[in-house]
Image (spheres, rainbow, N blue to C red):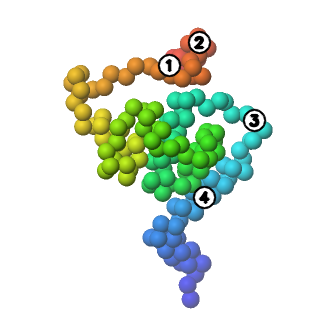
Amino acid sequence: MATITELNCALRESLESRGVLGQLKARIRAEVFNALDDQSEPRPALSHDNLLINELIREYLEFNKYRYTASVLTAESGQPEVPLDRQFMANELKVVEDPSSRSVPLLYGLLSHFLSSSGDSGGKLFLRGSAPATLTRDPNTLPGPES
């Protein structure tokens, strides 16, 4: 007769091999987050930039079937429950899609573009600071690297 430890091990292996264990863990984390989330504390306003970034991430998560992670992102960020229209996202990002690119998240297309483009600066892209206004603070109030 099998011991409890052996049964536990067999159950764990079975759930892992079917991909169920990871889903259960993610679901438990999402439910714990929802239970602990303080709804009385107002969320900061969602900037336009953050709305677009969150939507790119949500589209990627849902495409890869990380549904519980996407649900936590939506709950924690204050992102609207209904996803933004993909064509709206493409227009906002100034992206033109061909039919084959529409089958994958926009984030994949953006990554592919930057990985395949050589650019004028030795293959590197020059990024300019464009932090949303809500992130711009007096540098004197932030701890420096020496802190």
Indicate the position of residue 2 as horizontal and vertical percent values. Answer: 55, 84
Q: Would you say 18 lies left or right of 96 here?
A: right
The 10 Å Cα crowd at callout 3, few under 14, some 14 to 19, many 20 or more, is few
**Which residue occupies the foreground of this view, 103 or 9?**
103
Q: Earlier in the sequence, mark 3 or mark 1?
A: 3
Amino acid type of the residue that numbered disc 1 sits on in the rendered structure:
Pro
The 10 Å Cα crowd at callout 4, few under 14, some 14 to 19, many 20 or more, is some
Indicate the position of residue 17 as horizontal and vertical percent values. Answer: 45, 70
Front position among marks 1 and 4 = 4
**Which residue occupies the foreground of this view, 45 or 98?**
98
Amino acid type of the residue that numbered disc 3 sits on in the rendered structure:
Glu
Q: CA distance from mark 3 to mark 2?
A: 24 Å
Q: Quadrant of residue 142?
A: top right
Amino acid type of the residue that numbered disc 2 sits on in the rendered structure:
Asp
Q: Is residue 31 above or below residue 96?
A: below
Name the residue at 35% across, 37% down.
96
Indicate the position of residue 77 as horizontal and vertical percent values. Answer: 61, 39
**Residue at image mark 3:** 41
* Residue 120 appears in the rendering: yes
Disc 1 on helix, strand or loop? loop
Q: Is residue 33 above or below residue 123?
A: below
**Residue at image mark 1:** 145
Q: CA distance from mark 1 to mark 4?
A: 37 Å
Q: CA distance from mark 4 to mark 2?
A: 40 Å
Disc 4 on helix, strand or loop? helix
**Residue at image mark 2:** 138
Whether pointer 1 and pointer 4 mark residues with C-beta atoms closer than 8 Å, the reply is no
Disc 3 on helix, strand or loop? loop
